[in-house]
Amino acid sequence: MSHPNGLPEEDFRDLLVRVKDFRDRVISPQVLDWERNRTFPAEDIASAHQLGLLGMEIDPELGGLGVSFGQKLQILDLLAEVSMPYAFSLVNSHNVAARLARHGTEEQRSRFLTDLLTGKKLGSTALTEPAAGSDFSSITTEATSDDNGWRLNGEKAWITNAATSSVIVAYVQTNPGSRARGIASFLIDGTRPGFERIAPYDLIGSHAIGTGGFRLNNYLAQETDLLAPAGDGFSAALSTINEARTYVASMCCSMIETSLRLSVGYTTERESFGKPIIEHQGLSWQLARVANQLEAARALTDKAIAAVEHGDSESAILPAAHAKKFTTEVVESALSACAQAMGANGSREEHLIGHRLTAGRIANYVDGSTEIMTDRIAKSLPTTYGPVKFDQ
Ligand SMILES: Cc1cc2nc3c(=O)[nH]c(=O)nc-3n(C[C@H](O)[C@H](O)[C@H](O)COP(=O)(O)OP(=O)(O)OC[C@H]3O[C@@H](n4cnc5c(N)ncnc54)[C@H](O)[C@@H]3O)c2cc1C
């Protein structure tokens, strides 16, 4: 999916400066209001189109920026310092545009691509259902072929951007009982009859993700709405999952690093018992532990980025699983340690550590839970660490 070379170094540096300016002007002043009012900031996500961020990885000939995968992650990291939920929503809409740009038909692109790139419409990718999450092959939303096309029935749950999105890549079962073999994907238009939106969930935080669901009530999909036919849907869904796991890991690293910097700043300035707090070993060792976790998380994430950029999707599976597992397992304790070192001030909402904590919690679920990452690694043990003959 990525452009190996991306933007020339100087152009990319300029872009990062503009992204930072946009973040500080548009996002930072609003993050806390979004949480307090449980707002999904659809318009502010759409306004990122001014910088081309809704088409980051898409070819310039199709209206995108043409950045590389690694460059995309640097942009997301910058946004995630202030709001990972915002960055996550943005990249989820971007992913639908990128999917259409790479694999959509000319007709599908002409229907939706411009609207996605300009933020007139937001995109979602819908696998999860009320009764099927980790076990994706057990989805029951069903597509039945009839004379007019396909009739779709079922419910999707926990879908990023579903609060307002209207261009949706939905995975459905075409042959109940056949699990992965029967899964296909369709392009759903959320403005058409048969599409019923479900109100977004009230979460512990991270409302900018706009997570909700929808029902398909005899929704009529034409043959031209088919993205991946039965048999291809399952692998199509997994084809970009390593990228998603890697950017989730990267954004968690970014949240840890920005919190650690804040915490080191605070403990260097603040004194107790006659010296800066950071000079008390009992405290500085807690932050040293965070730094150590961050270095390890970054190293694993960089390895995953390199695997995504230079390898095939098969060779990126394990590096992405290692990066996401480790990073999501440490993110909450690392953020808590940063808050703890700031004393009561660590609990003030304007420091955003609470906002980041809820995002860190959610990172443990999205794009494959921590346990599913562990399972991936566990299943690879015999091949990765080969059997050494053990004489009893
Ligand atoms: C904010 C948010 C945004 C999301 N966005 C999207 C989206 O855009 N599109 C989408 O399709 N989905 C989305 N999801 C759903 C997400 O992908 C699921 O939450 C995830 O796949 C886990 O499924 P589940 O929550 O149903 O947990 P379950 O599958 O019910 O699992 C419950 C627990 O059991 C564990 N578990 C399950 N199976 C095993 C096993 N074999 N071994 C060990 N442990 C196991 C899980 O890790 C978890 O801890 C989102 C979720 C959240 C919270």
Image: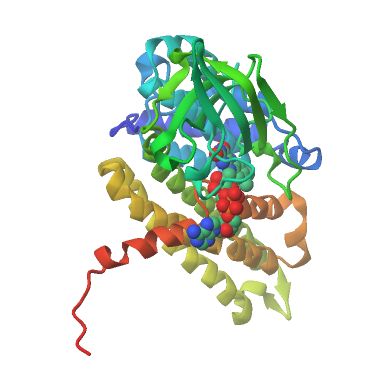
In-image side of 131 versus 178 (left or right):
right
Q: Position of residue 18 (x, y in %)?
A: 52, 29
> Which color scheme did the rendering employ for the protein?
rainbow
Q: Quadrant of residue 338?
A: bottom right
The answer to whether residue 13 is above or below residue 194 is: below
- In the displayed structure image, the side of residue 104 where residue 280 appears, left or right: right
Q: Residue furthest bottom?
A: 392
Quadrant of image for the N terminus: top left
Across and down, in percent, residue 169 comes to 51, 27
Camera-side residue: 298 or 116? 116
Q: Is residue 1 left or right of residue 161?
A: left
Q: For the C terminus, give its image quadrant.
A: bottom left
Q: Is residue 47 left or right of residue 70?
A: right
Q: Residue at x 43, y 47 (%)?
A: 246
The residue closer to the viewer here, 324 or 229, is 229
Q: How many marks?
A: 0
Q: Is residue 284 visible?
A: yes
Residue 183, picture quadrant:
top left
In the image, what residue occupies the spot 63% across and 33% down?
Answer: 155
Percent position (x, y) of residue 203? 73, 46
Q: Is residue 169 visible?
A: no
Question: Which one is in front, 343 or 107?
Answer: 107
Q: Position of residue 146 (x, y in %)?
A: 50, 15
Depicted 61 relative to depicted 254: above or below = above
